[in-house]
């Protein structure tokens, strides 16, 4: 994450604003936004209980205080601070995740609270509350914000449930929906930041993007981690290797027996050799060697011994002799007049 630069001291600016308020209003704002020694923000109910008043009355005091500060001479005098914040936000894309933006401006929670308060107080910023589609976010370029929101929705609509996309390709696909957005925003850092706004699009621990609810992105158990391990490896692995790789890649302890059981039960995996598993999406057929031979003959018709061995070897990690032994089973296979094998 890049570190943004601001030229003012947030705590000093908020101190100026609080000075225009009556004591109780100062206290309400301080507690509500965590501006004092206690950085935890208090709820309306908690503040009301401390004063013996209702939460609605606290809300009224808060709204009065914000309005009073916006009408004060201090608000006009601190215009450069708000402009500084706006520039920092635009530099990060004009639409930013709240948490990331605050962290980019200050490392400590106390200062982050002061920056957040200034965002609420300023009239250059719009707060977009978390909803079903997006996380908490702020915008300073409101036209761009609307385009990004729409583009993220369109991007999500193009994804399929189990699809996984490399980050570079995901960014390219996202860009195809952002044609009307200013070129100044079209760099990878900003595009990744915008992608992170979506609650429906996510990235798995291996850096691949897809639907956030998919087990390929939101891995929750051994079988999901096993899928990602095999996908990253790109070729069949022994179940003991899969268990070991889960620990190495995800820092998750996977028992060998548990891993083996999950590989057996999940249709995403295919046994292709003694203890060797591949992903079914790679095109491997299910079943024992005999079943694979039968499926090959059904698909290609009569074949020579050499042709059968070659095709089975593409489907299974077995010795040629194992294939030949299966071919001798006259219950399932026989030779035709041309000496080629067919199903019995």
Image (cartoon, helix red, strand yellow):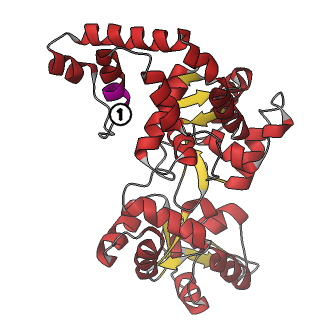
Residue 113 lies, in percent from the top left, at: 44, 36
Q: Magenta stretch: residue 184 in it?
A: no
Task: Sort mark 1 into few (<14), some (14-19) or many (20+) by Cα contacts within 10 Å.
Answer: many
Residue 28 lies, in percent from the top left, at: 31, 20
Which corner quadrant of the image does residue 181 belong to?
top right
Front one among 115 and 55: 115
The answer to whether residue 134 is visible is no
Front one among 274 and 244: 244
Front one among 42 and 284: 42
Q: Is residue 281 above or below residue 312?
A: above
At a point 52% along the width and 31% down the height, the residue shown is: 13
Q: In the visual, does 52 lie left or right of 112?
A: left
Residue 188 lies, in percent from the top left, at: 74, 49
At a point 51% along the width and 53% down the height, the residue shown is: 216
Label total for image: 1
- From which residue to which does the magenta span run? 30-35
Q: In the visual, does 161 lie left or right of 253?
A: right
Residue occupied by mark 1: 34
Q: Is residue 338 above or below residue 114?
A: below
At a point 35% along the width and 27% down the height, the residue shown is: 30
The answer to whether residue 119 is visible is yes
Residue 91 lies, in percent from the top left, at: 72, 40
Q: Magenta stretch: residue 31 in it?
A: yes
Q: Is residue 296 above or below residue 63?
A: below
Q: In the visual, does 189 lie left or right of 246?
A: right
On the rendered image, what quadrant is the C terminus found in? bottom right
Q: Secondary structure at mark 1?
A: loop
Which SS does the magenta portion mostly show?
helix
């Amino acid at each position: 994450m890049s570190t943004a630069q601001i030229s003012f001291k947030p705590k000093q600016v908020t101190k100026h604003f609080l000075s225009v308020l009556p004591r109780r209003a100062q206290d309400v704002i301080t507690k509500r936004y965590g501006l004092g020694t206690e950085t935890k923000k208090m709820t309306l109910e908690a503040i009301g209980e401390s004063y013996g008043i209702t939460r609605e009355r606290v809300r009224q005091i808060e709204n009065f205080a914000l309005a009073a500060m916006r009408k004060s001479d201090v608000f006009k005098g601190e215009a450069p601070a708000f402009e500084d914040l706006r520039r920092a936000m635009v530099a990060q894309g004009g639409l930013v995740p709240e948490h990331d933006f605050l962290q980019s401006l200050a490392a400590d929670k106390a200062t982050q609270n002061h920056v957040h308060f200034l965002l609420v107080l300023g009239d250059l910023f719009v707060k977009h509350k978390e909803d079903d589609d997006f996380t908490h976010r702020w915008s300073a370029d409101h036209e761009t914000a609307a385009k990004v929101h729409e583009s993220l929705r369109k991007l999500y609509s193009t994804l399929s449930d189990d699809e996984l996309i490399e980050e570079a390709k995901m960014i390219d696909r996202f860009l195809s929906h952002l044609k009307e957005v200013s070129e100044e925003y079209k760099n990878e850092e900003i595009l990744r930041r915008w992608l992170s706004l979506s609650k429906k699009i996510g990235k798995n621990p291996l850096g691949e993007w897809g639907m956030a609810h998919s087990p390929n992105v939101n891995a929750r158990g051994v079988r999901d981690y096993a899928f990602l391990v095999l996908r990253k490896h790109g070729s069949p692995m022994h179940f003991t290797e899969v268990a070991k790789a889960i620990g190495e890649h995800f820092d998750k302890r996977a028992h060998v027996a548990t891993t083996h059981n999950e590989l057996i039960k999940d249709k995403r995996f295919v046994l292709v050799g003694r203890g060797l598993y591949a992903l079914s999406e790679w095109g491997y057929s299910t079943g024992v060697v005999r079943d694979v031979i039968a499926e090959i003959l059904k698909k290609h018709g009569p074949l020579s011994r050499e042709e059968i061995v070659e095709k089975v070897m593409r489907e299974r990690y077995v010795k040629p002799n194992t294939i030949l032994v299966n071919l001798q089973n006259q219950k399932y296979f026989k030779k035709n007049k041309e000496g080629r094998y067919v199903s019995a």
